[in-house]
Image (tube, helix red, strand yellow):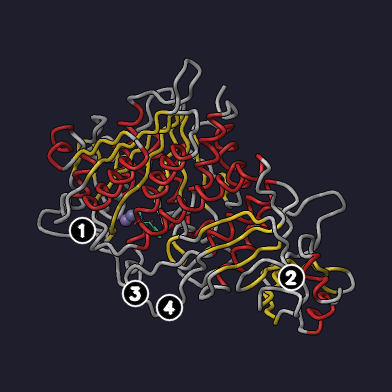
Amino acid sequence: MTALTLSTSSAAALRADAVVVGVTKGTKGPEVAPGAEAVDQAFDGRLAATLETLGASGAEGEVTKLPAPAGLKAPVVLAVGLGEAPADGAGFDTEVLRKAAGVAARTLAGSKKAALALPVEDAAAAQAVAEGALLGAYAYTAYQAGNGKAPLTEVALVGAKPRDKAYKAAAERATVVAEEVNRSRDLINMPPNDLTPKAFAAFVQEAAKEYGLKVEVLDEKALVKGGYGGIMGVGQGSANPPRLVKIVHNGGKGRDAKHLALVGKGITYDSGGISLKPAGHNETMKCDMSGAAAVFSTVVAAARLGLPVTVTGWLALAENMPSGAAARPGDVLRMYSGKTVEVLNTDAEGRLVMADAITRASEETPDAIIDVATLTGAMVLALGTRIFGVMSNDDDFRTAVHETAGEVGEQSWPMPLPADLRKAMDSATADIANMGERMGGGLAAGLFLKEFVGEGITWAHVDIAGPAFNESGPFGYTPKGGTGSAVRTLVRLAEKAAEGELFQ
Ligand code: BES
Ligand code: MN
Ligand code: ZN
């Protein structure tokens, strides 16, 4: 993991392999962004002109590498585009800073230490730059014999005041958040032959020990005994049996303390089951546990940040495989809630495991339940690969989740739960079928889950099927592969719950 430091020395004096500066798009060409004054001086004030000669414009995403002049300790200067400069008095957009720092950190893979001389005029900007750098430096190399470029070992923020309380807190928060997003990415990227439900549960137990969290694991015997027909129905076809894991950060002491329950889809591999996915649709299905990874990371982050709120995570872990023991299309499962479900398509497995976990989470009457799942291909068709969908039984809560995501730089969009889609899920033999109309499939899945939410409980459903796994090239601070989608949103929601901003 890349280390973060706040440095008091100037960007010119700092010993590093590269110094990173920001460039904005001015009306008459590129301009050096605040924070890089010392670097510009080393260029005799000609840094912007030099960059322009090299073809730089200051556009977002742009990187320009140039040799450093004599006055700098670092041998290389890396200029990253920040787009148009903000209006007078306004700060840079935090997501622009996060992305620029991410691009810089990724570009500098293979070097050891980077000095970031980006605009960090307040603690919020410093936090964004730090997060972006730590997220952008990420690489998954656990199964490679070191032939790739190693991530940066250290990033030093220049211009952030190390003795200022707000900057210190920002650095601390950025480190925890980025490390927990990266924990999710590691789990998502881990091959499914190694990340079985049992192995996932063991990782949770290990982290729980490290951070003093309470954890409970129900194994297949306990799941049968407890009547978890949804989780067992999905997991019964696999040689790697299912688990339901509960992990608790008990920060909510005192009478007004709030309780947020998070439920994550943890299908460690989704083959589709008997309704087998065709080739071309199963190569990335190790990512189908991204919701559970996000929930796990969030509970650990809440503990590390010491948030005064109780956050309970429920991880519904199973492997969806075809076999002689697998559930068949036509089977009826008796769910943990007592409802019966006709399995029309074994590839609609996420809603089955999630339904049981949501019912179980509801028994503790939390102030709200948020479930996170790579639930439907339909949501990817609707919103693309960078935006997650948010549904809820409460319009204000859906708005809160959507707006919170925006504040931390995650793209989301509110989606409806139209009641008329329920009719298509009527079953001739059971209370409900696990599939309805194909059109609006993401909304139908949400409607299905809604029936398992306890009476009177505020609930939101977050479908991250699009952004959870990046199949194309890296961009901003987002790597190829597991992205850690939803972690930052969930952590911010937990903070808001702790601050009394989420529920009254
Ligand atoms: N895990 C998939 C959804 C998915 C698709 C996640 C693409 C990430 C990327 C889910 O279990 C699934 O197979 N859903 C089906 C449901 C259908 C059979 C009703 C789908 O969306 O096609
Ligand atoms: Mn599936
Ligand atoms: Zn799935």
How many numbered circles are shown? Answer: 4
Residues at circles 1 and 2 in contact by the CB criterion of under 8 Å: no
Q: Which mark is residue 144?
A: 3
Between the C-alphas of marks 4 and 2, the distance is 28 Å
Q: Which residue is mark 4?
A: 148
What x and y, as percent, mark residue 47?
81, 75
**Could you tell me the amino acid type at mark 4?**
Gly
> Does the residue tagged 2 have its C-beta within 8 Å of any atom of ligand 1?
no
Q: Which residue is mark 2?
A: 59
> Does the residue tagged 1 have its C-beta within 8 Å of any atom of ligand 2?
no
- Left or right, 166 with respect to 191, comes to right
Mark closer to the chain start, 4 or 2: 2
Q: Nearer the viewer, mark 1 or mark 2?
A: 2
Residues at circles 4 and 3 in contact by the CB criterion of under 8 Å: yes
> Does the residue tagged 4 have its C-beta within 8 Å of any atom of ligand 1?
no
Task: Please identify the quadrant where the N terminus is shown.
Answer: bottom left
Residues at circles 4 and 1 in contact by the CB criterion of under 8 Å: no
Task: Please identify the quadrant where the C terminus is shown.
Answer: top right
Ligand 1: quadrant of the figure: bottom left
Q: Which mark is residue 321?
A: 1
**Could you tell me the amino acid type at mark 3?**
Gln
Q: Residue at x 32, y 43 (%)?
A: 315
One can see residue 422 in this view: no
What x and y, as percent, mark residue 259?
44, 27
Question: Which is nearer the eye, 93 or 413?
Answer: 93
Few, some or many residues within 10 Å of mark 3 (<14, 14–19, 20+)? few
